Image (cartoon, rainbow, N blue to C red):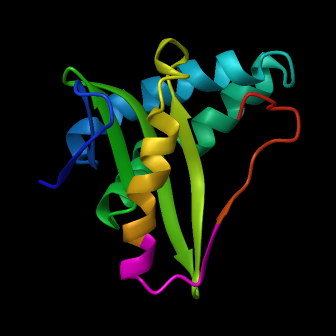
Amino acid sequence: MLAIPSVHPYATVRIASPADLTAVREVADTTWHATYREILSKATIDAFLRRFYSDYRILAAVNDGGLWVLEEDGRVVGYERLSMRGDVGYIGAIYVLPESQRLGHGRRLIDTARPWFAARGASEIRLTVAEHNHAA
């Protein structure tokens, strides 16, 4: 298992495994509700989470090697979803639990993505952020 030490001595970033399915879903649920509760309805958030964080979708991301998790003291507190389309790399999702935000973890996840994209020949990397997600 590849583990990359974070700038924080208690945190590491590693490739996700099937055992991380529940933890990724919990991070998604917590961060989506905290981040978008003032922007989207609870029903919209819940529908999105059901659709895009099904077992099938998370395991597909694990199987293609593009899902990475960030752990603090052995607990998953963040993740990112990476993919390629042609020679363009996409960070499709990057989330860190609210209590672990503003510690440099998002930057660490992005820094981990750079060599992953380079190894796949990416000529550029794109990240989309919701317009009203000012903290991101």
> Which residues lie in the magenta part?
117-125
Q: Is residue 123 magenta?
A: yes
Q: Is residue 101 shown above or below 110?
A: above
Where residue 112 appears, as percent x and y from the top left, is 38, 55
Q: Is residue 119 shown above or below 81?
A: below
Q: Name the residue located 68 percent from the left edge and 37 percent from the top edge.
A: 48
Q: Nearer the viewer, residue 52 or 92?
A: 92
Q: Nearer the viewer, residue 90 or 10?
A: 10
Q: Name the residue located 33 percent from the left edge and 36 percent from the top edge.
A: 7
Where residue 126 appears, as percent x and y from the top left, is 67, 65
- Please indicate whether residue 87 sits to the left or right of residue 127 in the image: left
- Please indicate whether residue 82 sits to the left or right of residue 55 in the image: right
Quadrant of the rendered image containing residue 51: top right
Where residue 124 appears, as percent x and y from the top left, is 62, 77
Residue 132 in sight: yes
Q: Quadrant of the C terminus?
A: top right
Q: Quadrant of the N terminus?
A: bottom left
Q: Name the residue located 51 percent from the left edge and 68 percent from the top edge.
A: 83
